[in-house]
Image (tube, rainbow, N blue to C red):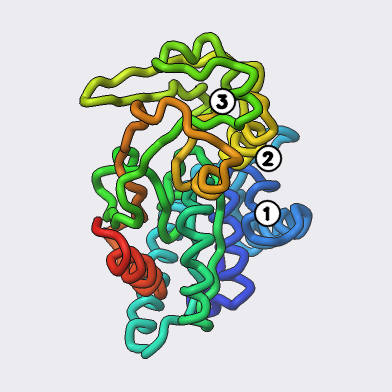
Amino acid sequence: MLPISKISRADLADLNSFLMVYRFCNFTQAAKELGVTTSALSHSIRNLESRLGVRLLNRTSRTVSPTDAGISLAKRLEIGFSEIGDALAEVNRHRERPVGRLRLNVLQDGARLVIAKYLPMYLHKYPEMSVEISVEDKMVDIVAAGFDAGFRFGGTIPADLVAVKVTPPLKWVTVASPAYLYRHTAPREPEDLNNHNCIQMRTGQGIIYRWEFEKAGEQRAVDVPGKVCVNDTSLVLELALAGVGIGYCLEMRAATFLASGQLREVLPDWAPTEPPMYLYYPGHRSIPPGLKEFIEVIRGDIEGNIQL
């Protein structure tokens, strides 16, 4: 057995590596998360098992699963590393300026609307901080995945997490290029979209999104037809600009193209306003170094320019 009094830096690194494999049940994903090669990670786990004298993982050519001993160790390590993180965060609070690394999970729209705008301000103000950003549209358990915070639309955040508004309410618009509208009669009602080529959007949950509309309290949703289906707003806009069809996105994402006339809004009377985007994080543990300051940078700018 590994004597507790003699735990080395290498031991801690190997324990962290094991915990990452346990979370992902996949050596390749865990190695990518740790920034090491798969072979180096496998070597670390074998060394740890050898020192402990216990097999922690069952491996086949296709699967990785923890043994009973592995499950027991992982549960204790989750608690231990969480305590260490909280202790370091507590120490950091005594510093005048935060130091550390933030790990954020962000929707694609959030990356463009919030991160791209405010991260440069934040890093300029707090140069001793570093930030790692994972951009994806699927729902992620930020606690289990090891993120400090995430960005999601209102209504999609678990109730037990702290949520901070980081945008005003969001308007969704239907857009098309002048060239497309020259060739096709512009729709007057949402159902008219059934006679158009629409650029469909597949959500992070794997479903094709039903376009939602609202006018004077009346709500409608349309399963639009289309020859193209994508999962990225930037590509929706590029295809709409190229005249492929009608797109649906946040007004803030299309604002530059609408202002220049490269795109025109379709069905403007039916554009719905939906809940804002929020930054959220677990409230049951200490807020990590730098997160409070990141929130302050965002809120300070928004509250100075937009009434939330």
What amino acid type should be assigned to the residue bearing mark 1?
Lys
- Marking on residue 246: 3
Q: Disc 2 versus disc 3: distance between alpha carbons?
A: 49 Å
Q: Quadrant of the N terminus?
A: bottom right
Q: Residue at x 48, y 74 (%)?
A: 121
Please report whichever mark, 2 or 3, sits nearer to the chain's N-terminal start. Answer: 2
Give me the disc on residue 59: 2
Depth check: give the residue in front, 75 or 52.
75
Screen quadrant of the C terminus: bottom left
Q: Is residue 146 visible?
A: no
In the picture provided, is 74 more to the left or to the right than 164? right
| Mark 1, other Cα within 10 Å: few <14 / some 14–19 / many ≥20 | few
The x and y percentages for residue 70 are 52, 49
* Whether residue 95 is situated above or below residue 283 in the rendered picture: below
User: What separation in Å lies between label 3 and label 1 (alpha carbons)?
Assistant: 38 Å
* Relative image position of residue 255 (x, y in whole percent): 49, 47
Secondary structure of the residue carrying numbered label 3: loop
- Classify mark 2: helix, strand or loop: strand
Choose between 105 and 69: the one closer to the eye: 105
The quarter holding residue 154 reads: top left
- Image location of residue 294, percent across then percent down: 40, 70
Q: Residue at point 46% right, 43% down?
A: 140
Q: For the residue carrying disc 3, how many other residues have a C-alpha within 10 Å: few (<14), some (14-19), or many (20+)?
A: many
| Label number found at residue 32 | 1
**Marks 3,1: beta carbons within 8 A:** no
In front: mark 2 or mark 3? 3
Using residue 239 as the reference point, say whether residue 23 is left or right of it: left
Looking at the rendered image, the disc whose residue lies closer to the viewer, 3 or 1, is 3
Q: Amino acid at mark 3?
A: Ile
